[in-house]
Image: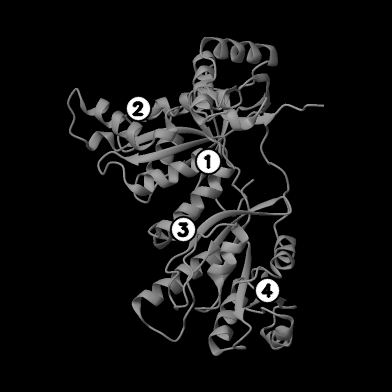
Amino acid sequence: MSNPVVAIVGRPNVGKSTLFNRIVGERLAIVEDTPGVTRDRLYSRAEWLGKEFHLIDTGGIDFDDHDILLEHIRYQAELAIDEADVIILVVDGTTGITDQDQEVARMLFRSKKPIVLAVNKIDNIQRLNDVYEFYSLGFGDPMAVSGAHATGIGDMLDEVIKHFPEYEGDEYGDDVIRVSLIGRPNVGKSSLVNALLGEDRVIVSNIAGTTRDAIDTPFTFEDQDYVLIDTAGMRKRGKVYESTEKYSVMRALRAMERSDVVLVLIDAEEGIIEQDKKVAGYAHEAGRGVIIVVNKWDAVEKDDKTMNKFIADIRGEFKYLAYAPIVFVSAKTKQRVHTILPKVSQVAEQHSLRIATPILNDLIHEATTVTPPPTDKGRRLRISYATQVAVKPPTFVLFVNDTELMHFSYQRYLENKLREAFPMEGTPIRILVRNKSTE
């Protein structure tokens, strides 16, 4: 299931970015007392009372100014509203209701989305009376908050999570492999979807996807059931959405969260650009199986060194995806497209790999014997016990004498030993380090 999306919207200079930073716990958004500083939407994962969600910070919506930049900001905010499950409307308690607040409110009424009204800059108890006039906007009880002083944020988030969609369970069985395609616009996602589903041995189900955030296509290939989670909401709603880079990133995030394996598409003609690295990074952080697919390979002039050079470039730019296999295809000519689904099946299997505890501990013992952990101020790390606690991705806990003695380089060494001993191509590995109980 993909996490809910919460959008923070409002007119310029009401403190949206300050609230955003308070909720995510980091100073990610630029906070400046100048309208229009937040020029685009900014995304982050957030959590409240155990519920994870995506938070979008938007630029101020200004209906009075027809400056091209401000029109772009308004358009971006409208996209965020369209994408959101819940909207936080932020107003300024020190100025009262303005004509722009009322314009924004009218736009939000049309969205038919749940709205939580946050009256910001209520910095002390004397200002509480400033909240009441905002009842007239028609969104129920206004929430008095102060982004600057971090007051009222918890009550506001309590109200936000009440409106999250109910999780109805996975509509597919555990034996179904969920695959999503991600990549920047015009990299060939739609063409590759058509090429995959056009394989002679693929049986496509007539059952239409029911999810809001993507179109699902169930199909069977060589007796294995798959679901292709296509970020097709962009296609469905028109080309203009796919041309909006940040919107396509959010679509990709939501598709990835429902996937077992993610196909990261790269345009062979244009090479690797910054957005490719950003989107691929999301797949890695989400803990999904990853396959890097270089599309449009037919359009590249090649010699005997071209493929190896491209592989070297990918490994250099995507160091965190060293485990991900690379396939070179052409969706247009269907060159090597037949190699993708067998590779997906293999990665999905390894993403679900479970290692018996005795075998795991034998491996860790052997690794620490061959290369003992380095000492730190005369103290040496000792690993007492290891166990696997999860799959998708394989996740291991190491119980040690002192977690501060585990250097990242030694943790990477242990990960490499795990990969040498067990088939883990295409899947990230999570290693958690915990202090051994002294009781």
- What is the C-alpha distance between the residues marked 2 and 3? 30 Å
Pointers 2 and 4 in contact (CB under 8 A)? no
Of callouts 2 and 3, the N-terminal one = 3
Q: Residue furthest right?
A: 439
Please, is residue 279 above or below residue 247 in the view? above
The answer, for residue 409, to whether it is visible in the render is: yes
The mark lying in front, picked from 4 and 1, is: 4
Does residue 199 appear left or right of residue 359 in this picture?
left
Name the residue rendered at 21%, 35% in the picture.
300
**Residue 323: assigned label:** none
**Residue 247: assigned label:** 3
**Residue 285: assigned label:** 1
The mark lying in front, picked from 1 and 3, is: 1
Of callouts 2 and 1, the N-terminal one = 1
- What is the C-alpha distance between the residues marked 4 and 1? 32 Å
| Residue 365 % position (x, y) | 61, 12
Which element carries disc 1, helix, strand or loop? helix
Which element carries disc 4, helix, strand or loop? loop
Name the residue rendered at 35%, 27% in the picture.
336
- What is the C-alpha distance between the residues marked 2 and 4? 56 Å
